[in-house]
Amino acid sequence: MESGLARARSLLAAHPLVDGHNDLPQAMRRHASYDFDKVDIAEPQPRLLQTDIPRLKAGCVGGQFWSVYVPSRLQGDHAVSATLEQIDAVLAMVRRYSDTFGLATTADEVERVFASGRIASLMGMEGGHSIDCSLATLRAMYALGVRYMTLTHNDNVPWADSATDEPRLGGLSRFGEEVVAEMNHLGMLVDLSHVSADTMRAALRVSEAPVIFSHSSARAVCDVPRNVPDDVLAALPDNGGVCMVTFVPEFVTPACAEWRAEAAEAARAQGVKPTDLSAFFEFTKEWQREHPKPQASIADAVAHVEHVREVAGIDHLGLGGDYDGTDTFPVGMEDVSGYPRLFAALLDRGWSEVDLAKLAGGNALRVLRDAEAVAADLRQRRAPSLATYADLDGPGPG
């Protein structure tokens, strides 16, 4: 009889696993200034990275949204140019390793690349600061292949509140609503990871297309602002969107969340801003020596997957690991090779292969396809928006 792990691998060979968020581009910026000669991901890179080609293949990854994230300490033109550099790095990676990766900008292209035996490569911007309050810049990013934008990262943007900053707007401003409308017009997915609960609710009210959470888990299971409250999960069926469960221990396990809260308090006392990820990670490297970080388990990840299924339904569930975006992951899922272990655990719990195919990538592809259809309809009915931040929100950025 075939083992659970073998069954999981067979299933993922037939149905693409489309992961919502991987920070390899930013890790390559940090470790090698995007030089794939210096850090060749065709070879195992366990010392530096959680993602490389051998482990992507071992993990049966069939499609990947590569995050073209830049830190929110970069603003204005600096944020835009750094995002362009991230996009350039993804395109260069896909060209260099073309036997492994294929660029995809539509659901059909994801399926074609997967059928060719390669990993479909999509891009997502992480934070509205990447467009500098400019709808024209948003359209340019779409033209370069970006297919989602996370409305905020850890800090507010002028038109949307973040989950981890002091609320300023109570959700979206008028310009923020216009950003969502223009994303719908383009066919760019509205990503609500990192945003405040009020921003989530506002975006669900405004968006004419399904939204995603590219890497968020369930707040009822682990009560942190980065996770999704049950009322928002319950609203996903009406919108058609999908919550892509993440594996970041601090968002998955209450003990790890408590550890992070204590680390954040200690960091602030030393003048380190916890939302500045690079500075905070450097701080916690030392802090962990006296305050060891608790471990998360695959069972912790399973609890979030099953809670989202219970509240939102099986058609509104996906996965977004956030590999190379944090330092530790659940035992057995320490890097991108771990996905089959999660699927084996779900098979052991009685999940059907039909439902697991939806979790793997079926739901994510349906959302992308639905967003494409909404955009095709909207483009017949209205022109691209020429609104500016000043038009809608008054004097200020932009």
Image (cartoon, grey):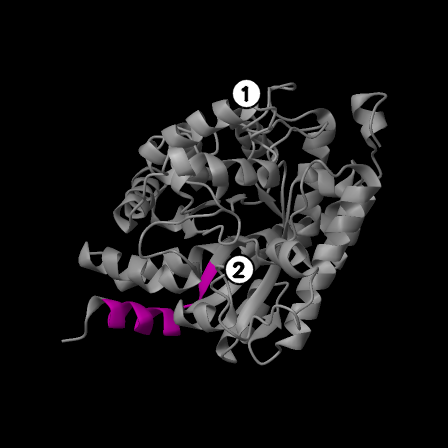
Residue beneath the point at 49% across and 54% down: 323
Q: Quadrant of residue 269?
A: top right
Badge 2 amino acid: Leu
Badge 1 amino acid: Ala
Q: In which quarter of the image is residue 350?
A: bottom left
Whether 9 is among the magenta residues is yes
Return the residue at label 1: 269
Residue beneath the point at 63% across and 30% down: 155
Mark yes or no: residue 193 visible: no
Residue beneath the point at 82% across and 45% down: 136
Percent of width and height locating residue 121: 59, 65
In the rendered structure, the answer to whether residue 118 lies left or right of residue 88 reads left
Q: How far apart are marks 1 and 2 (CA)?
A: 29 Å
325 w.r.t. 284: above or below: below
* Magenta highlight range: 5-18
Mark yes or no: residue 148 visible: yes
First along the sequence among labels 1 and 2 = 2
Q: Is the magenta stretch mostly helix, strand or loop?
A: helix
In the rendered structure, the answer to whether residue 255 lies left or right of residue 162 reads left
Whether 367 is among the magenta residues is no
Residue beneath the point at 80% across and 43% down: 78
Return the residue at label 2: 48
Q: Nearer the viewer, residue 324 or 268?
A: 268
